[in-house]
Image (cartoon, rainbow, N blue to C red):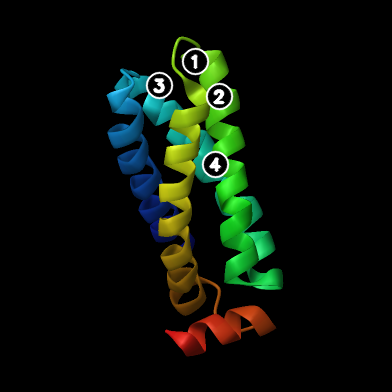
Amino acid sequence: MEHLKALIIKFAMITLVLFIVLGVWGVSFSNILVTSLILTAGAYVLGDLWIFPSLGNGVATIADLGLAFVGIWVIGEMLYPAVNLLLAALISAVIIAGGEWFFHKYMARNVLGRNTRHVRKEAQRV
């Protein structure tokens, strides 16, 4: 149940950021939702369940920045190619990465427990 709540929080955060940023570029809400779903799933598995517990918040946040940038760029090229994707992806990725820093703290405290070295450190800092 905790993973489901975390996924909903992450999806809402990513969707809100993309709605604000990509909305300025005229991307449709349906394309924003598709992009958000793909990014949420990929970033949760790679960044939050794999990288964060083993390497810590800093590395996971940087990985999420890169994943968001590349993900928005690649997905955007397929779904909304008329948009200036480099700038839109960069702005979105930076804002998402900022949110991810705090989301990882939530993950350490409420979802992952304290079973790995880096997660224990993050949970103690909160």
Assign a secondary structure to mark 3: helix
Residue shown at the point (56%, 38%) measured from the top left = 69
Distance from Cα at disc 4 to Cα at disc 2: 10 Å
Mark whose residue sits in front, 4 or 3: 4
Query: Which residue in the structure is indicated by mark 4?
Result: 68
Mark 2: which secondary structure? helix
Q: Are marks 2 and 1 in contact (CB under 8 Å)?
A: yes
Can residue 48 be seen in the rendering of this structure? no
Q: Position of residue 88 (x, y in %)?
A: 44, 30
- The mark that comes first in sequence, 1 or 3, is 3
Which residue type carries mark 3? Asn
Q: Quadrant of residue 28?
A: top left
Q: Amino acid at mark 1?
A: Leu
Q: Which residue is mark 3?
A: 31
For the C terminus, the image quarter is: bottom left
Tag 3 and tag 2, C-beta contact below 8 Å = no
Q: CA distance from mark 4 to mark 3?
A: 15 Å
The answer to whether marks 1 and 3 mark residues whose Cβ atoms lie closer than 8 Å is yes
| Callout 2 amino acid | Ile
Could you say where residue 82 lies in the image, as x and y percent from the top left?
A: 45, 9
Q: Which residue is mark 1?
A: 79
Q: CA distance from mark 2 to mark 1?
A: 6 Å
Q: Quadrant of the N terminus?
A: bottom left
Q: Which residue is mark 2?
A: 75
